[in-house]
């Protein structure tokens, strides 16, 4: 019999925000997740007194004041600013691309000289209307920076030549003709003190949560338990992949505890050459200004997703877009079901956009 107003499949950010809002509105809510922990991909666990981002680095940033005020109800955020470093065969460059990068690459000292250099290289490459990622990148930052700092990293990350990737992937890349090392153009930025898991725990206070439960293994049982279901798992898995598999990129992490206090002096270092097998190394203690005697690092390796792997980044090309649209039309026929979040909507979501989307759903529903 129906015991709940809402069953929420997935205890990541989308599901947890909706659960919190529904509980506040007096609804009876159950959250289930197939993992042994809450918080989805923002899950952090303490190792050596350091909050380790188990599923990759998550840096909260937003210009949305409503979202910022909402998350600050559940966590206090530190002042972390994302300023990654690029390592190209031992040469270190500032990210995002800014005057430090241009000076190191070309010896230029003024914004005008940097712009001139980029314009020259764009003309030499004969680019007017960028048709793919390679051409888009060269038109933004020139051939030298593309070859050293974009090409190898991007091809490792996506497993495809840059010429075969759509131009829009690189359009969000910040390029600055100032000495500003802050990667995000965001008014609000930081990491929750004590980690993301604690933040999500506070969101789910008073909400019934069951872990190690796979909704798809016994969906008929779960469907009888609630008036409505918020499903945040992969949309193609919900339909037993009847139209085919949506493609993702997956990520594998090798995490090490090192008996030194400082491995690389920065939270994130990207390895932008083709030869280094990992895309970046994260040193977790620098997300939270720690001074422990030891450190924890994670090497990230990008790979093509296959069934059984963790899906990370949707491959938003034409083919997958059409397949998702076909699944979305199927989902509209599912009564009492709402599909949401990164996997439910097959969409690359920043954290603040996921939260905004869940808050918006809660407003409509409740």
Image (spheres, grey):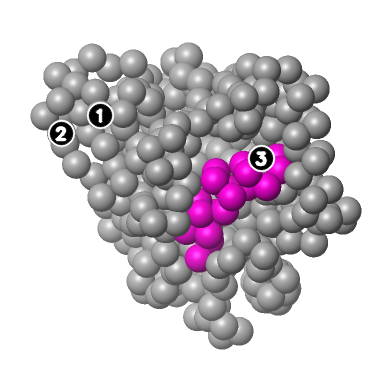
- Indicate left or right for 58 with 340 as reference: left
Q: Is residue 206 visible?
A: no
Where is residue 115 drawn, in percent x and y?
Answer: 78, 30
Where is residue 191 drawn, in percent x and y?
Answer: 44, 24
Quadrant location of the N terminus in the rendered image: bottom left
Q: Nearer the viewer, residue 79 or 107?
A: 107
Per the rendered image, the range of residues in magenta is 141-159
Where is residue 233 drawn, in percent x and y?
Answer: 49, 61
Q: Which tag, 2 or 3, sits closer to the chain's start?
A: 3
Q: Which mark is residue 173?
A: 3
Q: Is residue 216 above or below residue 4?
A: below
Q: Which mark is residue 258?
A: 2
Q: Dot 1: what SS?
A: loop
Residue found 67% across the figure and 52% down from its top: 169
Q: Which mark is residue 263?
A: 1
Residue 143 in the magenta stretch? The answer is: yes
């Amino acid at each position: 019999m129906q015991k709940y107003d809402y069953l929420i499949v997935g205890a990541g950010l989308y599901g947890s925000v909706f659960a919190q809002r529904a509980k506040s509105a007096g609804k009876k809510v159950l959250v289930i997740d197939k993992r042994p922990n809450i918080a989805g991909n923002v899950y952090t666990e303490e190792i050596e007194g350091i909050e380790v981002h188990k599923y990759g680095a998550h840096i909260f940033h937003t210009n949305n004041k409503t979202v910022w005020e909402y998350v600050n109800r559940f966590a206090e955020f530190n002042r972390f600013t994302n300023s990654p470093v690029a390592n190209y065969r031992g040469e270190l460059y500032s990210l995002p691309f800014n005057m430090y990068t241009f000076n190191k690459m070309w010896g230029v000292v003024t914004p005008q000289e940097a712009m001139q250099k980029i314009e020259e290289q764009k003309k030499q490459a004969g680019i007017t209307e960028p048709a793919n990622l390679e051409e888009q990148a060269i038109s933004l930052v020139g051939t030298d920076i593309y070859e050293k700092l974009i090409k190898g990293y991007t091809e490792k990350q996506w497993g495809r030549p840059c010429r075969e990737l759509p131009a829009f992937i690189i359009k969000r890349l910040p390029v600055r003709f100032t000495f500003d090392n802050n990667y995000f153009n965001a008014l609000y930025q930081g990491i929750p003190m004590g980690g993301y898991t604690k933040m999500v725990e506070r969101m789910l206070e008073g909400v019934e949560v069951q872990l190690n439960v796979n909704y798809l293994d016994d969906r008929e049982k779960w469907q009888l338990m609630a008036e409505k279901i918020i499903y945040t798992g992969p949309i193609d898995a919900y339909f037993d992949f009847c139209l085919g598999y949506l493609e993702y990129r997956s990520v594998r992490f090798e995490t090490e505890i090192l008996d030194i206090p400082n491995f690389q002096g920065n939270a994130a270092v990207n390895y932008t050459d083709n030869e280094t097998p990992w895309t970046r190394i994260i040193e977790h203690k620098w997300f939270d200004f720690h001074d422990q005697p030891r450190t924890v690092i994670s090497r990230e390796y990008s790979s093509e997703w296959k069934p059984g792997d963790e899906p990370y980044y949707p491959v938003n090309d034409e083919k997958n877009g059409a397949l998702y649209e076909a699944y979305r039309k199927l989902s509209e026929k599912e009564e009492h079901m709402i599909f949401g979040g990164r996997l439910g909507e097959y969409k690359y979501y920043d954290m603040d956009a996921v939260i905004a989307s869940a808050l918006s759903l809660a407003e409509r529903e409740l």
